[in-house]
Amino acid sequence: MRGFAFRKIIFLLLLSNFSFGQNLPLSKDAHVSVLTCGLGNESYSFFGHTAIRVADPANNIDVVYNYGAFDFRTPNFVAKFAKGDLQYFVIAHSYNDFIKEYDYEKRSVYEQKLLIPQEARQKLFDNLNVTLLSDERYYTYKFIDKNCTSMVVDIINKTLNEKVITKKGDTDITYRSILFPYFDGHFYEKLGTSIIFGTKVDQSGTKIFLPFELKNSLEKTTFQNHPLTSKSKTLLSFEKVTPISWWNNVYSYILILGFIILINKRFVDNIYLFILSLMGIFFISMGFYSFHRELALNYNVLLFSPLLLFLIIFSAINNKRWTYKFAVLHLILLIIYTLFIINKAHFFIVLPMIITSGVVLARIAIRNKKRIPIII
């Protein structure tokens, strides 16, 4: 459907006998608007979506420009996405196709018309088409810095020749805190992003990077002494329904960690620490491998320490002295980690894991501590 819509807009432009260097003039009744799409239950739709609509009934134009497209057929797709050099691109849909897709997915859509002069609407339309029909349509996706929302902000600001759209509200809380509510009902996705993200997401969230941040900011933005957009109009309205999962919830998390604490078996402790160490190796590797700055400088490796592998090895060969030393070392790292994240947004979600690790490391230390002989 998207490929057909893309070909359709190219055909429209060519049919009108307008070349790259010429403009397709919009009528005075044309309007340009920002579309904000509601949250979904798939990982790619947790945060919603942003697009730009250009509607001109006089010229039979009703097109949606979407900066959120990517091609699953890209060679080494997963590796490129993980590394942070996957190319996203802008495509165009007919408005009817676009709205039908969100109606099918039962996701709300809101529209805010840009209250800008005719020449600015024309310039934005021209900029969108130049981007669509050139190599400029490709960009390297970045979770915070370059995505479907930030690209919409950039092209509107570029058209207006100034930084009109800026973040309004929530600039004093961190990106991590901003993201947290979007994972409600998806516990392990919330836990996973909490522990794989590093220091960048603990910075103050001064950039617009999420669709509803843009929607809220547009409501408070002025241009040439009047509101930049009209009041938001609801095109589709659905209540977000989060599916109930018997495993993807805090209860299974507590149950698993509670089992590790209560079972008090050496092999269970070692399996738990082995999993933590493998995760730590993965976090460090991704920090060096990936261009995603959100994954760099991940202090969560204090909890998921790769050095736990040495503790397991020394325990396996029954070297009590070094097993004890590494257990104590990791207890110290655990205390430092706890103090460091106590004021972070993800403190309570990782607290059960901190407690479990503390119990496991303490009993390993006790098991391997050299006994002091009692002389009577």
Image (cartoon, rainbow, N blue to C red):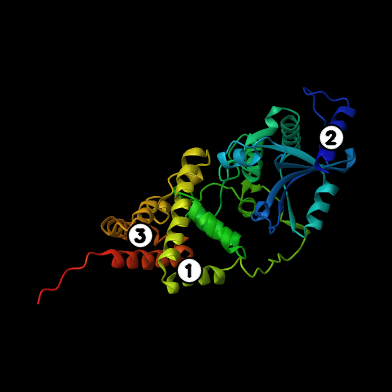
Which residue appears farthest toward the front when viewing the image?
317
Amino acid under label 3?
Answer: Leu
Residue appearing at x 30%, y 67% in the figure? 367
Along the polypeptide, which appears first: circle 3 or circle 2?
2
Q: Quadrant of the N terminus?
A: top right
Along the polypeptide, which appears first: circle 1 or circle 2?
2
Which residue appears farthest toward the left when viewing the image?
376
What residue is pinned by disc 1? Answer: 257
| Residue 141 higher or lower than 362, as above or below | above
| Residue 119 x, y percent position in the rendering | 74, 34
**Mark 1 → mark 3, Cα distance in angstroms:** 16 Å
Q: Secondary structure at mark 2?
A: helix
Along the polypeptide, which appears first: circle 1 or circle 3?
1
Residue appearing at x 14%, y 73% in the figure? 374
Residue appearing at x 58%, y 64% in the figure? 187
Q: Quadrant of the C terminus?
A: bottom left
Which residue appears farthest toward the bottom when viewing the image?
376
In this view of the protein, can residue 96 be seen by the observer? yes
Q: Secondary structure at mark 1?
A: helix
Q: Residues within 10 Å of mark 1 (few under 14, many from 20)?
A: some
| Residue 85 higher or lower than 41, as above or below | above
**Mark 3 → mark 2, Cα distance in angstroms:** 56 Å
Amino acid under label 1?
Answer: Leu
What residue is pinned by disc 2? Answer: 7
What residue is pinned by disc 3? Answer: 334
Amino acid under label 2?
Answer: Arg
Total labels drawn? 3
